[in-house]
Structures are given as C-alpha cells and as structure tokens.
Image: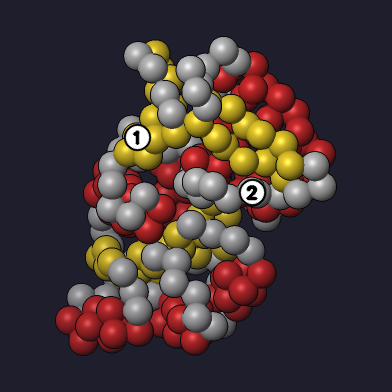
Amino acid sequence: MRILLAEDHVSLAESVAQALRHLHLTVDVLHDGVAADLALNSEDYALAVLDVGLPRLDGFDVLARLRGRGKHLPVLMLTARSDVKDRVHGLNLGADDYLAKPFELSELEARVKALLRRSVLGGERQQRCGPLVYDLDTRRFALGDACLTLTSREQAVLEALIARPGRVMSKEQLAAQVFGLDEEASADAIEIYVHRLRKKLDGQAVAIVTFRGLGYLLEARDA
C-alpha cells in the first residue's frame, strides 16, 4: 500500500518513513503543504500522514482541501501543538486521528495499522481469497499453513489485488500502488511481478487472472 507523509522536519520525516517502509508500505515523503496538496490531488493513496505545521500550506489547509474534493482516505495529523482547540479543529475538518510530538515510532506504526485496517479491510484484521490470507497487523500473506515470502514489490501488487475483491485492476493502477513519486512508475514491470506471484501461487486454489486489455483480478478457484 502507498501512503503520503508530509513533514517539514527532514530528519523526523526520514525516521518515520523508514519505520513505515519496514511495514512494507510505499511511502512518498514531502516537506511542504503545496506539494502535499498536489500529490493528494493527483496520486492514489491508502492513507496520509500530515504535519500541522507545514510551510506554504499548513496541514489543516491540506486536509480541508482534500475533504473539499470529496476524498475520504484516512488522515493522521502530527502536531507539536498542545492546544486542545487545534486538535478539535483538525478533527472537525475530517482528520481520523491525531498524534502529538514527540511520539514513539511504535505508537505511530500502531495508529497507521489501525487506520489502514479500518479503511482497507473494513475493520477486519484479515482478508481472504480462497486459501490466501492477508493479515494487516503483521502485514503478511499466508497460503494455507505456510507464510508466503514476497519482495516489497510483489507484496504491494498482491495487497492491491486482495483489497479489491472482484475488481479488475489495470497495470497503471497497480503501478500507482507500487512506485513512489521519486521512482519511475513502470506499468510493464507489473507484468514481471504478476508473473513471479503466479509462480508462488501455482497449484493453489487462488490465481491472478488476466483480462486482456483491462488488467488483473485475484480469484479463488475450486481446489
């Protein structure tokens, strides 16, 4: 899954991004509100982490513009402000959670997992497609009784497919979940990841089906 982190404190942003990447998340890091607003308007994210004190456009304004466009992705606000009024203001604008600085990275990870669980899995901890099980808390796939070993790219593709049961996803849509802003998104590379995943799913009652000219669908099959 791909998330946006907008934090103007460079070293803090890198620490947070590194922690989230350890959860196998694709993280786009930006350092000002205007860039964050543009990214949220043009890219497909599962979650946004916004610092309140962003330059050029603060986190409240970024959030207000996001909700004004009718976007409902979960938003976690970060703030060094202790004033309750600020927190209430952010929640009234549509923030889903608030975390005051300084914070432990473990707490941020837990809050991110909780928000993703609610938004992606509808509050469930697991999602299934035949014998394939995805656990959002551990960010791991299991196939039957065995843990499925995946690269970060393969993980991102399979997460996107299992989160959208019955829905065909194009290579471009999958690429948007796999590659960050600082990477060259390659739709053709998705074919490689899908090929690798098919080999790992081979012989099981779950498969990635190709719809020519449209994209891919994860489908449970009779054993």
Instruction: Name which residue type carries label 2.
Output: Val
Q: Which residue is mark 2?
A: 168
- Please tell me which residue lies in front, 19 or 212: 212
Image-quadrant location for residue 23 = top left
Question: Is residue 8 shown left or right of residue 92?
Answer: right
Q: Is residue 122 above or below residue 149?
A: below
Instruction: Name which residue type carries label 1.
Output: Asp
Q: Is residue 34 above or below residue 30?
A: below
Q: Which mark is residue 135?
A: 1
Q: Are marks 1 and 2 in contact (CB under 8 Å)?
A: no
Taking the spot 34% from the left edge, 35% from the top edge, the residue there is 135
Q: Is residue 40 above or below residue 161?
A: below
Graded by Cα atoms within 10 Å as few (under 14), some (14 to 19) or many (20 or more), the crowding at tag 2 reads some
Element marked by disc 2: loop
Taking the spot 62% from the left edge, 41% from the top edge, the residue there is 217
Closer to the eye: label 1 or 2: 2
- Please tell me which residue lies in front, 78 or 119: 119
Question: Is residue 36 shown left or right of residue 85?
Answer: right
Q: Which mark is residue 122?
A: none
Image-quadrant location for residue 142 = top left
Graded by Cα atoms within 10 Å as few (under 14), some (14 to 19) or many (20 or more), the crowding at tag 1 reads some
Q: Position of residue 208 (x, y in %)?
A: 62, 32
Element marked by disc 1: strand
Farthest left residue in view: 84
Q: Position of residue 161 (x, y in %)?
A: 55, 42
Taking the spot 45% from the left edge, 66% from the top edge, the residue there is 73
- Please tell me which residue lies in front, 145 or 60: 145
Taking the spot 57% from the left edge, 13% from the top edge, the residue there is 203
Residue 150 in view here: yes
Residue 58 in view here: no
